[in-house]
Image (spheres, rainbow, N blue to C red):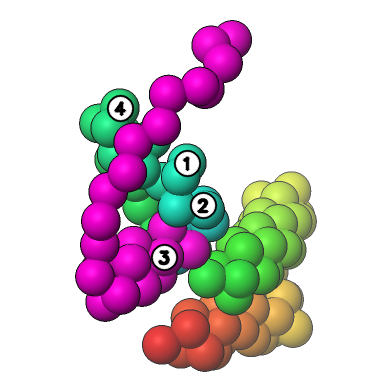
Amino acid sequence: MDERNSAIIVRLTQKEKQELKKKAKACGLKMEPFIRELIKGTEIKAKPPDEYVRLVREVNYIGNNINQIAHIANANKDIKREQLDMVKKLQNDIIKAMRGLS
């Protein structure tokens, strides 16, 4: 690995520095790694909010439940009212979770 032993000085206004810090933090990086990624031409995206990770887990959980209900319905060639109600509840849970992010 190349040793970083070459430095440059870039003068920024306080406002520019704060903007750089803000953008780097939004991507989960410190200023120096953020600048290095920009130099490499990397497309840097802001990291998703913590709620996004929770929502993905929740949707996966709900999807698994719906899949289990579908397997039961296919195996039995029948689906009970309670199972349909459960699917509707799970769909509502997804909608509520998504609304919570906005």
| Residue identifier under label 4 | 40
Whether residue 73 is visible: no
The stretch drawn in magenta includes residue 9: yes
Magenta residues?
A: 1-25
Secondary structure under badge 4? helix
Dot 3 falls on a residue whose secondary structure is: helix
x and y, in percent, of residue 34 in the image: 41, 46
Left or right for 79, reference 94: right
Q: Residue at x 28, y 32 (%)?
A: 39
Earlier sequence position, callout 2 versus callout 3: 3
- Mark 2–mark 1 contact, CB under 8 Å? yes
For this orientation, the residue located farthest to the top is 1
- Quadrant of the image occupied by residue 24: bottom left
Position of the C terminus, as image quadrant, is bottom left
Q: Secondary structure at mark 2?
A: loop
Question: Mark 2 = which residue?
Answer: 29
Amino acid tagged 3 = Lys
Q: Which residue sits at x=27%, y=48%? A: 10
Kindly report the distance in space between the C-alpha atoms of the residues bearing marks 3 and 1. Answer: 11 Å
**Numbered circle sitting on residue 33:** 1
Q: Amino acid at mark 1?
A: Pro
In the rendered image, residue 74, in percent from the top left (x then y), is placed at 66, 51
Mark 4 or mark 2, earlier in chain: 2
Question: Taking 52 as reference, is 21 left or right?
Answer: left
Nearer to us of marks 4 and 3 is 3
The residue at the point 30 percent across, 75 percent down is 14
Residue beneath disc 3? 21
- Label 2 packing within 10 angstroms: few (<14), some (14-19), many (20+): some
- Amino acid type of the residue tagged 2 in the rendering: Leu
